[in-house]
Image (cartoon, grey):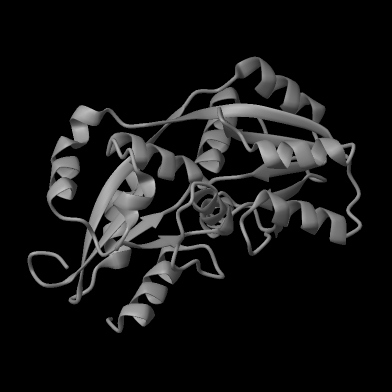
């Protein structure tokens, strides 16, 4: 519990999502603390981008909302048409799909579970025409998805649109110090890289010992599987990957609003 006696929820996420996160978790019975573990910056591999755009692949797969933002912004800068009439669009995650709709994309293939395995199952289960895939993604990409597409004989165009890195530690010293004196009741993780960065920023040497007594919520199975691979269990994963669903799940478990 926090010093105010309310349930203390620590939400890890991208540095620019603080206000959005706090608005979702705001409640009289909970106190939310935002921990920025990821900093995203647009940085385009120009040569790969132009080659992929000219090829007009059958599918464009957006694996994050920031990937949507970076892609459409760069197309605008270069005066390019973002989507060709016959291209199909796949979105990973609810917010990614929302960002695409905001950009004017109406026809979106959207697997409910935002994982590489879910995308591959979607492609396997339906008779889609098309053999080439454009993936505007982060520098670390999605290895599982790329591997799965290659194994299925697909032509892929992975293009780095942005970098995914840790914030400067000096900028978040206050929250790091506060967490050394008071652990949260819950920690929310939104990506495997968020887990790794949190452990690194907090200088956690014994993962299991640190997380003992803390409940953990993950936004999707990929993040949950990553935690389990490190020997750390989690307590809640929503069927629908969103922060609002995580809030509802925690509220139900804890008996709060």
Q: Nearer the viewer, residue 199 or 243?
A: 199
Q: Position of residue 94 (x, y in %)?
A: 55, 60
Q: Nearer the viewer, residue 192 or 125?
A: 192
Using the rendered image of the protein, determine whether residue 119 is visible from the camera's viewpoint: yes
Relative to 79, is 46 above or below?
above
Q: Position of residue 70 (x, y in %)?
A: 52, 34
Determine the residue positioned at 32% across, 51% down: 209
Using the rendered image of the protein, determine whether residue 83 is visible from the camera's viewpoint: no
Q: How many tags in the picture?
A: 0
Determine the residue positioned at 48% across, 51% down: 231
Q: Position of residue 27 (x, y in %)?
A: 23, 73
Pick the quarter of the image with the C terminus: bottom left
Image position of 217 (left or right of 106): left
Q: Position of residue 153 (x, y in %)?
A: 90, 37
Determine the residue positioned at 56% across, 42% down: 68
The image quarter containing residue 75 is top right
Determine the residue positioned at 26% across, 51% down: 34
Image position of 118 (left or right of 214): right
């Amino acid at each position: 519990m926090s010093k105010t006696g309310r349930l203390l929820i620590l939400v890890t996420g991208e540095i620019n999502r603080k206000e959005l996160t706090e608005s979702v978790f705001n409640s009289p019975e909970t106190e939310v603390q935002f921990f920025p573990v990821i900093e995203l910056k647009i940085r385009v591999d120009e040569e790969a981008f132009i080659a992929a755009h000219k090829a007009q692949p059958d599918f464009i797969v957006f694996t994050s909302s920031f990937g949507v933002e970076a892609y459409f912004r760069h197309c605008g800068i270069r005066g390019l048409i973002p989507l060709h009439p016959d291209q199909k669009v796949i979105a990973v995650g609810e917010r990614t799909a929302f960002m695409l709709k905001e950009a004017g994309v109406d026809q979106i293939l959207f697997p409910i579970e935002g994982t590489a395995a879910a995308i591959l199952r979607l492609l396997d289960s339906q008779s889609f025409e098309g053999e080439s895939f454009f993936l505007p993604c982060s520098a670390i990409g999605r290895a599982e998805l790329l591997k799965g597409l290659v194994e299925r004989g697909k032509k892929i165009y992975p293009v780095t649109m942005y970098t995914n890195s840790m914030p400067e530690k000096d900028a978040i010293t206050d929250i790091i110090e506060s967490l050394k004196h008071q652990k949260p009741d819950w920690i929310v993780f939104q990506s495997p890289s968020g887990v790794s960065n949190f452990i690194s920023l907090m200088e956690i040497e014994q993962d299991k010992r640190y997380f003992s007594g803390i409940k953990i919520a993950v936004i999707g199975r990929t993040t949950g599987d990553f935690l389990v691979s490190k020997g750390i269990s989690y307590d809640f994963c929503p069927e629908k990957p969103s922060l609002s669903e995580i809030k509802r799940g925690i509220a139900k478990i804890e008996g709060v609003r």
